[in-house]
Image: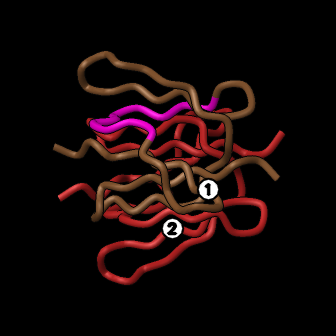
Chain colours: A red, B brown
Amino acid sequence: MCESKVFLATAEGEELVLEDVTSIRPEGDGYRLATLFGEQAHVRGRIKDIDLLKHRVVLEPLP
Amino acid sequence: MCESKVFLATAEGEELVLEDVTSIRPEGDGYRLATLFGEQAHVRGRIKDIDLLKHRVVLEPLP
């Protein structure tokens, strides 16, 4: 399976927002995340890095 | 493996940009794509949809 962990990059490092994410869609000033299990979250920010080998998506706050 | 196909949404449908993509990073007015095999492409546009179950990333032109 190809679920990813989604992180938010902060000044202190990377904060885990949600695991097992399968869907990422733009919504408002950020992205709507959804997992295999129906869990959802909205994160304000923009894409910083997507690494599908490491199953990592990193968002960063808007400037 | 979790490589994805990256498509660009156009008025005519979705155009395949690159397969086996493992890395997506913002660059300029779009994204730099890279594959497992070192192939790279740059696409102008923004994220429209990421579906990791279907191994699909769809970009759309900037408005």
- Comparing A58 with B30, the one in front is B30
Looking at the picture, do discs 2 and 1 lie on one chain?
Answer: no
Boundaries of the magenta span:
B17-26
Q: How many numbered markers are drawn?
A: 2
- Residue shown at the point (24%, 55%) measured from the top left: A2
Q: In the rendered structure, does residue B23 fall within the stretch colored magenta?
A: yes
Q: Estimate the x, y position of residue A7 in percent, counting from the top left.
A: 50, 48
Most extreme residue toward the bottom, as rendered?
A: A38
Q: Which residue is mark 2?
A: A33
Q: Secondary structure at mark 1?
A: strand
Find the distance from the CA under tag 2 to the CA under tag 1: 24 Å
Q: Is residue A28 above or below residue A48?
A: below
Residue B10's disc is: 1
- Horizontal arrangement in the rendering, residue A3 relative to residue B28 (left or right): left
Q: Is residue B16 above or below residue B34?
A: below
Most extreme residue toward the front, as rendered?
A: B12
Are there few (<14), some (14-19), or many (20+) residues within 10 Å of tag 1? few
* Quadrant in the picture for residue A53: top left
- Comparing A50 with A61, the one in front is A50
- Residue shown at the point (32%, 46%) measured from the top left: B4
Q: Estimate the x, y position of residue B40 in percent, counting from the top left.
A: 43, 20
The chain under label 2 reads: A
Amino acid marked by disc 1: Thr
* Quadrant in the picture for residue A11: top right
- Comparing B60 with A13, the one in front is B60
- Residue shown at the point (62%, 69%) measured from the top left: A42
